[in-house]
Image (cartoon, grey):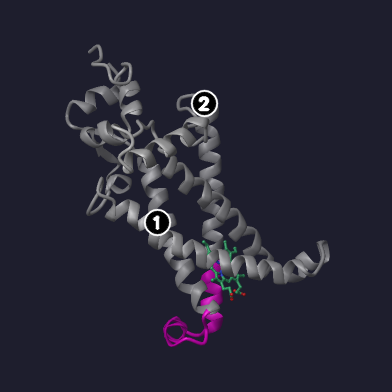
Amino acid sequence: MSEEAVQSETGYLVRFSAAQRVEHFVTMVDFVGLVATGLPQKFYTTSWAQWIIGTLGGIDSVRWIHRFFGVVLIVAVLWHGAGALKAILSRKVGFTMAVNKRDFTDAVKTLRYYLGLEDHPAAFDRYDYKQKWEYWSLMIGNVIMILSGLTLMYPALVARIGPGEIIPAAKVAHSNEGLMAFLVITIWHVFNAHLHPDVFPFDASIFTGKISRERMEHEHPLELASAEGREPGGHGHH
Ligand code: HEM
């Protein structure tokens, strides 16, 4: 019997390793830092922006703090990419974030279920289509924020390599994508982690690393079945 199967009999399964939990915590704090020092620069005429800039010691220090958090984000993204690559190449885990055809049929099935046109919701594996959507949006967003952020940090260098128009374009991309990232995290992510009926009031799994077997049955039945060495929907062979 696998380690997961043994743990599942105690009611909980390990979902995230200590390293994954630390990574989420670091990027969470870093993102708050980036938003808190980025948005006041975009909305500098407002009183709340003036208050933040004043509290942090003026615009120069706000810019430096933002760049510091920016460099932390770069390191975190490289770290994540290297870790993901290592895990996939080791073949101990599959590329569970890869998008496949099933995600599209799952999305349609789930919508049909919400509309009462289907008796059962779609059965998900380790990550459902919404989690994959959020993950890849975040990854693409990170690449945009990093490339445009570096362009704003080193405009003279970038203008030497390519056309000067890149700099105002980077500013527009960085500014709007930054605002969008803030809205996506506060509306979409907070809804899914706190307000969604499956997890209300708070999905603590990324902090504790654990998820209940009951939630696994409901939210990730396919992953639970393979962790317990049985066919989905079957009763296993312990
Ligand atoms: C999710 C991550 C990030 C968010 C939400 C964010 C947000 C913002 C916002 C809203 C602005 C103001 C733009 C404007 O004035 O309209 C800004 C400016 C800036 N950001 Fe970011 N940013 C992020 C990541 C980064 C990264 C990774 C870097 C670079 C390493 C970076 C470097 C800069 C620079 C250089 C500026 C121009 C202000 C200055 O000279 O310091 N940002 N950011």
Establish whether ligand 1 lies closer than 8 Å to the Cβ of label 2. no
For disc 2, the marked residue is 90
Ligand 1 quadrant assignment: bottom right
Mark 2 surroundings: few (<14), some (14-19) or many (≥20) residues within 10 A: few
- Residue 137 in view: yes
Q: Main secondary structure of the magenta part?
A: helix
The label nearer to you, 1 versus 2, is 1
- Would you name the residue on which mark 1 appears? 188
Q: Are marks 1 and 2 in contact (CB under 8 Å)?
A: no
- For badge 1, the amino acid type reads Trp
- The relative height of residue 22 versus residue 73 in the rendered view (above or below) is above
The image's mark for residue 138 is none
- The secondary structure type at the circle numbered 2 is helix
Q: Nearer the viewer, residue 133 or 148?
A: 133
Q: CA distance from mark 1 to mark 2?
A: 33 Å
Q: Position of residue 126 (x, y in %)?
A: 39, 33
